[in-house]
Amino acid sequence: MYQTYFDNVKKASRCMTRIGADESALVLQSLAQELRLAADVIVAANHKDLERMAEDNPKYDRLKLTKDRIDAIASDTESVALLPCPVGEVLESRVLPNELVLEKKRVALGVVGVIYEARPNVTIDVFALCLRSGNACVLKGGRDAEFSNKVLIEIIKKVLDKRGLDPDIIQLLPSDRKATDELMNAVGYVDVLIPRGSQGLIDSVRDNARLPVIETGAGIVHTYFDESGDLKLGKQVICNAKTRRVSVCNALDCLVLHQKRLNELPGLVHQMAERQVEIFADERAHKQLKGHYPDQLLHKATKADFGTEFLSLKLSVKTVDNLDAALDHIYRYSSKHSEAIIAEDAHVIERYVNEVDAAAVYVNTSTAFTDGAQFGLGAEIGISTQKLHARGPMGLRELTSYKWIIKGKGQVRPA
């Protein structure tokens, strides 16, 4: 059953080199138009998925599609269409002493597999990026988004068929666990596997896949408010990082506060109370907030509250004596996704930027910007937290490799 999916996409992937930049752009522009026209159909399918999930589930917001969100997805698709197609770019060229002409040229990865959970927008993002970068793709969405993913795939295949392209360049596997196992073992059919979702999903794929895996890690995100930090700036940045959209991986989880700014903590988190953010504060921070933050929203922190990706209106607060202690705390608990500092001291900023090990490090701004579209990539296939091949938001270039092309005039290598 599953072998058919892999056979079809592998065979179809051979035609990807013949889909030029102009054609892929037209496909994506047509897809954006179809998404907007089918918004009611997509929302209806998505509603079936939402009915099976409790509204207080952290995944609920990620799963939910509205007409505005569909329009945003369509706009991202159009943005990808406008980006330069990276395939064929000559990265390096030189003539060797023996007159061989050597070129290093960018090529597609081949067939990209993606395993993801309750995020139907990923279905469109992955297809758009893969098509524009010359890749075929195999998708394995979670059961939570089953109805949404199916209707989105139908729309994609409809557009491909209209353009005379092989619809098998994208495959959606069944939502059962067996399909996940098969995809993780699709050696010879899938060139790279990218998991998007919870830390449990990512760990499972990394530990069990026989394919090369690019980790898109969970976001355990910190913002360090330094002794030199600007209070007004800090208020708006911290609130935005925490509350803009709580269910995404770049949302703030832990505020790390220099002890000399403790007396300003109530003012720093004042806006959080209006957004009903629960705060889990260490002993010093809790003492400072007591009586200045709603009792029902204020809790004493436990060890479990640090190193946790909340994906909800919850925030931990850690008080530190100095920059070294802040760096130690972040080193211990960071998932290497996005980390930020609010400071005016140039030396402190330089140390933080140099010493924090994360895919994206922010200075005096919100971690909410860790996003392919915000980085000018059109969209992203994931936020890579590893260091080999790609790191941070993965756009078109990150979905390519390269090959060497050597042109000669009969040269032979001496014995």
Image: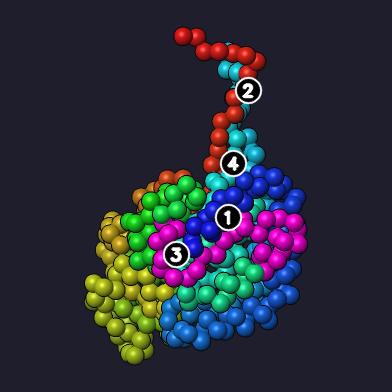
> Disc 2 or 1, which lies upstream in sequence?
1
> Disc 2 or 4, which lies upstream in sequence?
4
Sort mark 2 into few (<14), some (14-19) or many (20+) by Cα contacts within 10 Å: few
User: Is residue 36 one of those drawn in magenta?
Assistant: no
What distance separates the C-alpha of mark 2 from that of mark 3? 43 Å
Q: Nearer the viewer, mark 2 or mark 1?
A: 1
**Residue shown at 42%/81% (left/top)?**
57
Residue ID for mark 3: 179
Q: Tell me which amino acid carries mark 4.
A: Val
Residue 234 versus residue 8: which sits nearer the camera? 8
**Residue 45 in which image quadrant:** bottom right
On the picture, is 77 further left or further right than 199? right
Q: Tell me which amino acid carries mark 1.
A: Asn
Q: Tell me which amino acid carries mark 2.
A: Lys
Bounds of the magenta span?
A: 155-184
Mark linked to residue 407: 2
Residue farthest to the top, as pictured: 415
**Residue at disc 3, secondary structure:** helix
**Residue at disc 2, secondary structure:** strand
Residue ID for mark 4: 107
Sort mark 3 into few (<14), some (14-19) or many (20+) by Cα contacts within 10 Å: some
